[in-house]
Amino acid sequence: MPEKKMNHDKKVIIIGGGAVGMAVATSLRRHSNYSVTVFSKDKHTAYGQCGMPFVIGKQIKDFDSLILRDNKFFKDMGIDLRLESKVDSVDIGGQKVISNEQEYHFDKLVIATGSKARIPRNLQGSSLQNVFTLRTLLDAMKIEEALNEASNVIIIGAGAIGAELAVAISQRNISTILLNRSSSVLSHNIDPDMAESIKEHLEYLGVKVITEHIPESINGETHVESVTIASTEFPADLVIISTGVEPENELASNAGIDIGDSGGIIVNEYLHPSVEGEFHQDIFCGGECVEVHELISGKPMLSQIASTARRMAGVIRNNLTSNPEQFGPILNPWVAVIGKLQVGSTGLTSKAARENDIKIVTGLATGSTRADYYPGGSKLFIKLIFSERYLIGAQIIGGEGVKERIDGLTLAIKKRTTVDELANIETCYAPPVSMLIDPLSFAAKGALKKMRKLRK
């Protein structure tokens, strides 16, 4: 009997209308006869969240350009999409969710509630007007409106979003301060020795970067007026708090679903959640609310990148349509564009390796993205991290060609590529796209030279 007939009249409820929720919903309607209802607290759905800083920076025309599908598209697919609708509770035993005092039965449930902005504890003034976080399209629209009247902006947190926003706002000739508690920017993704070039580039673009400090207070009566940093008041008529996110898991926890040490929902390889120690076969969880495992250390972690969410959506879809698929440990490859620089990483940083008691040897190289005589090239900075001769991490900064190298090195880590193999890697060459010898091999040869000295 065809699978579509087997699923006829079965109801799937999806909580969350982000990258996982809507991808599962549309896939199910295309590949099964499940009845699909999606609940989302957001006012919008199916939009490119990662593109929001680039609308603010004017590289993308407007926020409408980020909306990939309108509500009519989902209605025509037969998806019951309920925006600005909060699910108040989940009754796992009764297989129903409660929203606005109404009960909705499910045969299968997908929890994809994502994450929420993390606000520093005891930060005075965080509720003042013109103090924002950036999570939703509506958040971005409010920031854009406020920027039209802003002269001084302070961004708290120098992760990827904070750095992207700093560039976007500074390029609009608005005085911009980027504040970070760590000693370097992008500290979760790259090592300090690599991050220094990003800081220099931010400052070149007009961003004032302050590291190793936290805001003492955000000041004002009703609207923000200033931020106190190291006992000094800096004027601010707009503040964006970009200090990271945490899983939105209160609903799942209240329903009896187990939460891991990372704060994410505990799931098995099929993305079934743990309910009082037992994995529930009729429930799936995916996205930023889920705890995954890092490939090299094996430790639980959270992933906040869209590509991870999209892969999870495919696994959930396949398991709902009786095509069993597993979601294994990840390396969490990441890339960002900060002004004119691309920066990417995969696997463990040096700091993460030390925290896991992994002995490492690193190799560094500087090269170019094109032949020296070919116009338009830019510098390329590469750091490779090895343990027991195997590649376990990589970081790259350059004006182009970063994503492609990070993707290749992610596969190399998964295939347990050795320092010897990378030192002698075969690469193609054309002056408009590469040097004759790719700097990756120079970084590997640098690590290999260190290893030989250590053996003596």
Image (cartoon, helix red, strand yellow):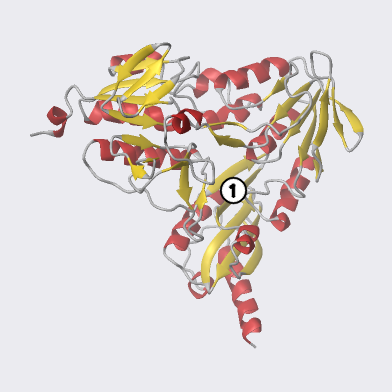
Toward the viewer: 375 or 278? Answer: 278
Q: Residue at x 34, y 41 (%)?
A: 272
Nearest the viewer among 311 and 261 is 261
Q: Which residue is mark 1?
A: 400
Residue under the image location 67 percent in, 20 percent down: 143
Whether residue 372 can be seen here: no
Q: What residue occupies the far right of the structure in this picture? A: 232
Q: Position of residue 160 (x, y in %)?
A: 64, 40
Residue 353, compared with residue 294, is above or below; it is below
The answer to whether residue 357 is above or below residue 32 is below
Q: Is residue 220 left or right of residue 119?
A: right
| Amino acid type, label 1 | Glu
Residue 80 place in picture, x, y as percent: 33, 16
Which residue is at the far top?
Answer: 101
Above/below status of 104 relative to 216 = above
In the image, residue 67 lies at what x, y percent?
Answer: 47, 21
Name which residue lies at 60% across and 35% down: 245
Q: Tell me where residue 255 appears, x and y as whole percent.
A: 42, 30
The quadrant of the picture occupied by the N terminus is top left
Snapshot quadrant of residue 109: top left
Question: Which quadrant is the C terminus positioned in?
Answer: bottom right
Q: Answer whether residue 198 is visible to the viewer in this image.
A: yes
